[in-house]
Amino acid sequence: MRELSIFVDESGDFGPFEKHSPFYVLSLVFHDQSDDIAQHLEKIRDALVARGLPADHAIHTGPLVRREQDYRLLDMPSRRSIFRVLVDFVRTSEVTHHSWVFSKRELGDTDRLVSAMSRELGELIRSSYEFFSSWERIVIYYDNGQKEITNLVNSVFNAHLSVEVRKVIPADYSLFQAADLCCTLSMLRRKIETSGLSASERGFFSTSKDSAERALRKGYFKSLDRQRFGG
């Protein structure tokens, strides 16, 4: 049976616009279940253990960049290497992705933000309907982190397609962590275009504003764009 897996993740909150939280990101990662990624997953597990983390650790790229949560005691080289492990996983595995970055300042409130996400997701499905309808089964994975996204996923996908929605435990699926990475990189791109990177972000990717932005554009954004779903 030809099965498509779609992993959904988000970055941001539904509160009012604030300087520290100006955007909301929604990312999808698509994986054809016939593509074997076992070797890629083994590389991730080996890399985590080598850096003192459990083999089943769920990589969270935002805290990794900011040196928060599980990464407080890790030095910069260790954190950068973990980030690159996840980037290499996405780059070398047969997955595609699509992300949207929404401005909370422009949309104003939760209802308008949810409506904008619903429109964009619906348009992606309609514009690629031939692709989606070619699968015998479509399974969508989300961790139910925010009820608005849970409702959005169920309502929009089921309005256009026959899908199965499952709750995912992040540590169980590196592809869900790949969606987290897509959220982070999409957010960083928008910040470069608007308010600029934070000090922790500049320090993580390089040593100065210009070189950090250059490193992201050449080393990460180009790779991300090559695997973008839907143009």
Image (spheres, rainbow, N blue to C red):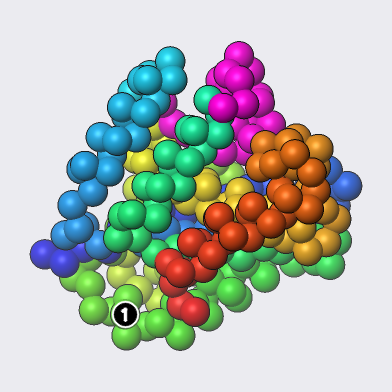
Which of the 4 image quarters holds residue 103? bottom right
At x 78%, y 53%, the residue is 210
- x%, y% of residue 82? 48, 33
Q: Is residue 195 above or below residue 122?
A: above
Which residues, given as a range, are shown in magenta?
Answer: 56-77
Q: Is residue 85 left or right of residue 119?
A: left
At x 32%, y 85%, the residue is 130
Q: Is residue 84 above or below residue 124?
A: above
- x%, y% of residue 158? 40, 68
The mark total stands at 1
Q: Residue furthest left?
A: 1
At x 32%, y 76%, the residue is 132
- Whether residue 21 is in magenta: the answer is no
- x%, y% of residue 96? 39, 64
At x 34%, y 35%, the residue is 44
Q: Is residue 130 left or right of residue 107?
A: left
- x%, y% of residue 155? 48, 65
- Whether residue 64 is in magenta: the answer is yes
Quadrant of the drawing holding the N terminus: bottom left
- Residue 177 in view here: no
Amino acid at circle 1:
Phe
Helix, strand, or loop for circle 1? helix
Q: Is residue 74 above or below residue 115?
A: above
Q: Nearer the viewer, residue 139 or 40?
A: 40
How would you rate the neighbour count of disc 1 (Cα within 10 Å): few for under 14, some for 14-19, many for 20 or more? few
- Residue 217 in view here: yes
Q: Nearer the viewer, residue 206 or 197?
A: 206
Q: Nearer the viewer, residue 194 or 136?
A: 194
Q: Residue furthest right?
A: 19
The residue wearing badge 1 is 131
